[in-house]
Image (cartoon, coloured by chain):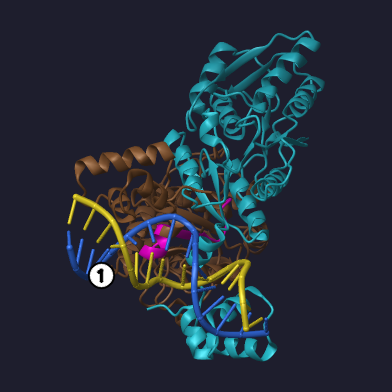
Chain colours: A cyan, B brown, C blue, D yellow
Amino acid sequence: MAVTIKDVASYANVGVGTVSRVLNGGSVNETTRELVLKAMKELKFTPNATAHRLRKNKTGVIAVLVPIINHPFFSEFVECVEEEADRYGWSVLIVSSQQKIEKENGIIEKIRRKEIDGAIFVTHYEHDEKDLMGCPFVSIDRPLTKDIPYVTSNNYDATAEALEYLISGGCKKIGYIGSKPIVNSEVMQREKAYLDTMAKHGLEPRIVNEVIMHGEERGVADKFFSKFPDVDGVFAAGYTMAQTTYTVAIEKGYSVPDGLQIVGYDGSFKNWGSIKSLTAVEQPIADMAKTVVDLLYGVIEGKQTPLRTVLGAKLVKGATTK
Amino acid sequence: MAVTIKDVASYANVGVGTVSRVLNGGSVNETTRELVLKAMKELKFTPNATAHRLRKNKTGVIAVLVPIINHPFFSEFVECVEEEADRYGWSVLIVSSQQKIEKENGIIEKIRRKEIDGAIFVTHYEHDEKDLMGCPFVSIDRPLTKDIPYVTSNNYDATAEALEYLISGGCKKIGYIGSKPIVNSEVMQREKAYLDTMAKHGLEPRIVNEVIMHGEERGVADKFFSKFPDVDGVFAAGYTMAQTTYTVAIEKGYSVPDGLQIVGYDGSFKNWGSIKSLTAVEQPIADMAKTVVDLLYGVIEGKQTPLRTVLGAKLVKGATTK
DNA sequence: CTGAAAGCGCTTACAG
DNA sequence: CTGAAAGCGCTTACAG
């Protein structure tokens, strides 16, 4: 049998309210406090979090839902979220949606059941606005509903900058390889920036941008190179897409960066030791995580929060461009 | 105000016990059941998980503690754990210890407070046996205490196999680069297998094996190559270590695999698109995760569980050996 | 400052 | 099968 505040109270000859007050820093006579503290120690008392939660109607737990954990971008994101959540004393529940809608609905259910106080949703599904009503959510790169705050980076400008860099490096036949988001998302600004920049310079666009699952990048890269064998530059709109593009290009006999220059999105992940460093647009993942956690805190506390926060991504030069 | 079983009960003109019984599949008259179900639907009732937990003294939550999330091995491990936990209907709390002992103690505290039912501990600290007493724990690669079950792979045999492979590929001056575990762990079998295999073939050992933090691999690799510039083969005892070894070797002008062959531990991570594939010993991460979750289930349920489970790692050939 | 009591939302013997 | 009641372990007005 676990020891409860009741045991502590009778051991210290005080009421349970008093024990609760020393637990929560309420005002209690210094002598009584020490008496209670001593009783707690001698009884090896540990407060029960569940009972506390039931009374306070708050769990101190948030969830972070990502499409996949085992991925350079998302694992770093989750790592940062965990660290930021710690600042608020929050625990973080992780769920990998694996592109299964049930996993996402599971989070909504957990909020309804009061298992968690709120969630960070990185998802590619559309959800019924009614299902999300009243749920403390925040998200990345897109507005889940029109009143759910989200954090994004300047996809358009950073992509344009990357393309200008390829062009200034001598590329004339620049392609775009992407895995298209299946829902409206600011990630789509990458393709738009590509098209605009090509048009601006009078260059012909070469696009393969398809809806795929994680792990199916190779098919897209293969298709791209069969369709546009003459490219001298490519913008790959995602980390795994860029890595795959590089690998496939090498296999097909392109020489990088001499014959073919590659720029990716999300490039140098510190712990992954990519063998050759990619020139890439880098999103400020740690900032994005911090911001999104702060936003979630605001939402949970019922504060006014900005609906859209844009952080700056920037081009970092590596070995895949001249 | 949230709607509770009390509301449902009075709406359906039954007792709260009856509502609880339809919630938990207890025996209740079919007509009454439908009445209650209808009331739940009309009132949009969702049961409160916290109240349920308080009564059942069970949370349905486990934690997984890893040294770092943003890492090919650990992120895949966590991903698999989450998937396996799902089978038991468990939610999983993630914590990245970042080699901070407070984070690890936080988990112990969460168990004491009944925030979680148990935890998977992947850690490099020694813990006081008394602190862990009565905590449902399982771990990886080492026995946290003498009665905490753990899962490991056949580190010794797999390492020996890798070295035999280097030797059969013509290597004579084979080095060992590692980040030494700071506590007793089966990972140490890798160094032992190296030493034994060198001795068996009458080869001179070349070892740099140091206690470092994640992110400090480069210093170890630098030191290794300054100390043993003449190597023609190297066994790098970890994924990031191997990647770093490769990078440093290339920078120093070695040609891989012609002048220098490299074998790592944990090599081809599916979603990371390493540009050049590493020859490496691969641990069965998914199996390890499944096994460790099953073990934790056994421990939580108070069943008899094996203390040590060994799974097979095996050598997978890539482009860094001949 | 402090104790007794009510209540958070459930589950579970206990009678009937 | 079903209702009334007790209780899981806390917190919080309410008196004193």
Coordinates of residue A315 in the picture (x, y in percent): 77, 34
Residue A148: quadrant of the picture: top right
Q: Visible in this render: residue A101?
A: yes
Residue A204: quadrant of the picture: top right
- Quarter of the picture containing the N terminus of chain A is bottom left
Coordinates of residue A13 in the picture (x, y in percent): 53, 90
Inspect the magenta stretch and tell me whether residue B62 lies in it.
yes
Q: Nearer the viewer, residue A62 or A266?
A: A62
In-image side of A73 versus B156 (left or right): right
Q: Nearer the viewer, residue A78 or B2?
A: B2
Residue plotted at (58% across, 30% down): A241
Q: Visible in this render: residue A236?
A: no
Q: Which residue is mark 1?
A: B304
Q: Which residues are magenta?
A: B52-70
Inspect the magenta stretch and tell me whether residue A254 lies in it.
no
Residue A195: quadrant of the picture: top right
- Quarter of the picture containing the C terminus of chain A is top right
Residue type (three-letter) at the residue carrying disc 1: Gln
Q: Nearer the viewer, residue B150 or B199?
A: B150
Residue B186's place in the image compared with A2, above or below, is: above
Residue B33's place in the image compared with B15, above or below, is: above
Coordinates of residue A121 in the picture (x, y in percent): 57, 40
Q: How many numbered callouts?
A: 1
Please report, as a chain letter, where disc 1 is located.
B
Residue plotted at (61% across, 54% down): A82
- Near mark 1 (Cα within 10 A), the count class, few <14, some 14-19 or many ≥20, is few
Q: Helix, strand or loop at disc 1?
A: loop
Coordinates of residue A143 in the picture (x, y in percent): 64, 31
Residue A97's place in the image compared with A212, above or below, is: below
